[in-house]
Image (cartoon, rainbow, N blue to C red):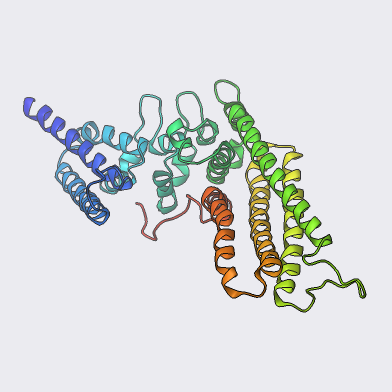
């Protein structure tokens, strides 16, 4: 008996080490800064590869034990791996011991319940590769009669929310989880009441009430700031269009620099700046007057914010081109070297906008129109 306990302890400890090794694969920047980047990546890849091999060897050794011993040794590491998103370990264990896919913790939750509650998309994506019993797992309920849709309606852990920037994008990610889980749950479960007499959508609304309010405030603050910038650019572009550089000819009334290439560039870029800034202004005003329903955070609001930021970036770019053309016409006196310092300085506000707002724009486009975090990652069946 002492030998069995020792073996079990060793196996659980080893499996925990494997879980750490597999999980650490997702954090390549945790090593000291003194180690070169390529060496860090190579070391992490090596740790990950060795952890996978070690887990497979452990499971192969445990296969010779009876079912009761296997459950006592592997069940806890399996649930912990599902909780922390170590999907490789989950896949290895369930491939070796398919019955453990139906293992439940003290709250009657299986690995997919735990993955949904903790927002571990890599473990949840294993559902796409399951060849059998997927339906039975997805309709199972925990000790409080919560379906998987109820668990998807609960607020994600804070560490998972922090992976997404901004309350609005966090709300969008939560809606994506709820919609994705809803695809797998039968329609009869969409209005199923748990022990608290709450349907899944009611749980979602109550759990995300504060996040929704924070997302609305964040969207309005962002739109207000961008509206001011767009209004200023539109005003400048409109004024520049009326008072053209160099003035007008007293005889014909036409601009003095008519026919000059730089003047043509000024006219086109100034008009483009006015149109794009006006579009941006209207888009951000529509965001400010939105109803801010839960569904709006999924597509409508992010789409408006993407369009507003893109048109604002274009308006800034065209404004800088227009101003540079004016400086060249009025002060350059057709000297080509004047273009170098002017163009260099004109790039500063454009570069500043890109550095400060481009990451937000990329995150918005990726989360709204990107591939997403859900879906089958390989054609190999789970079991």
| Residue 8 placement (x, y as % from top left) | 15, 32
The vertical placement of 300 against 269, above or below, is above
Residue that sits furthest to the left in the current view? 3
On the picture, is 39 further left or further right than 292? left
Query: Residue placed at 18% from the left, 33% from the top?
Result: 13
The vertical placement of 175 against 234, above or below, is above
Q: Visible in this render: residue 203? A: no
Question: Across the whole image, how many numbered discs are drawn on residues?
Answer: 0
Q: Visible in this render: residue 339? A: yes
On the picture, is 379 further left or further right than 179? left
On the picture, is 1 further left or further right than 291? left
Q: Nearer the viewer, residue 225 or 26?
A: 225
| Residue 211 placement (x, y as % from top left) | 58, 31
On the picture, is 155 further left or further right than 101? right
The vertical placement of 182 against 144, above or below, is below
| Residue 83 placement (x, y as % from top left) | 36, 35
Residue that sits furthest to the top in the current view? 196
Q: Nearer the viewer, residue 205 or 109?
A: 205
Quadrant of the drawing holding the N terminus: top left
Quadrant of the rendered structure where residue 249 is? bottom right
Residue that sits furthest to the bottom in the current view? 259
| Residue 138 placement (x, y as % from top left) | 47, 40
Query: Residue placed at 56% from the left, 44% from the top?
Result: 176
């Amino acid at each position: 008996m002492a030998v069995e306990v020792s073996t079990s302890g060793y196996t659980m400890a080893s499996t925990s080490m494997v879980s750490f090794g597999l999980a650490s694969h997702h954090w390549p920047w945790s090593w000291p800064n003194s180690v070169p980047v390529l060496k860090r990546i190579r070391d992490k890849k090596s740790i990950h590869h060795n952890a996978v091999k070690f887990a497979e060897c452990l499971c192969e050794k445990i296969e010779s034990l009876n079912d009761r011993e296997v459950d006592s040794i592997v069940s806890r590491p399996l649930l912990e791996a599902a909780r922390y998103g170590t999907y490789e370990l989950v896949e290895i264990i369930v491939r070796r011991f398919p019955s453990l896919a139906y293992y439940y913790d003290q709250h009657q939750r299986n690995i997919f319940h735990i993955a949904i509650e903790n927002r571990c998309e890599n473990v949840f994506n294993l559902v796409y590769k399951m060849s059998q019993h997927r339906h039975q797992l997805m309709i199972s309920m925990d000790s409080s009669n919560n379906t998987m849709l109820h668990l998807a309606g609960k607020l994600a852990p804070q560490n998972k929310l922090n992976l997404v920037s901004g309350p609005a994008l966090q709300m969008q990610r939560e809606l994506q989880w709820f919609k994705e889980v809803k695809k797998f749950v039968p329609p009869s479960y969409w209005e199923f009441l748990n022990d608290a007499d709450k349907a899944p959508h009611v749980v979602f609304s109550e759990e995300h009430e504060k996040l929704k309010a924070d997302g609305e405030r964040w969207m309005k603050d962002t739109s207000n700031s961008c509206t001011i910038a767009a209004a200023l650019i539109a005003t400048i572009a409109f004024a520049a269009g009326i008072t053209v550089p160099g003035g007008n000819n007293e005889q014909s009334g036409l601009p003095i620099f008519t026919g000059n290439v730089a003047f043509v560039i000024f006219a086109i870029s100034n008009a483009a700046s006015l149109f794009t800034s006006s579009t941006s202004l209207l888009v951000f005003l529509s965001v400010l007057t939105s109803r801010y329903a839960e569904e709006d955070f999924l597509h409508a609001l992010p789409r408006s914010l993407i369009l507003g930021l893109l048109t604002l970036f274009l308006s800034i770019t065209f404004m800088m081109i227009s101003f540079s053309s004016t400086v060249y016409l009025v002060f350059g006196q057709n000297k080509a070297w004047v273009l170098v310092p002017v163009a260099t300085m004109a790039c500063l506000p454009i570069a500043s906008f890109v550095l400060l707002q481009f990451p937000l724009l990329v995150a918005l486009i990726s989360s709204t129109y990107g591939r997403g975090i859900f879906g089958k990652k390989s054609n190999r069946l789970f079991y």
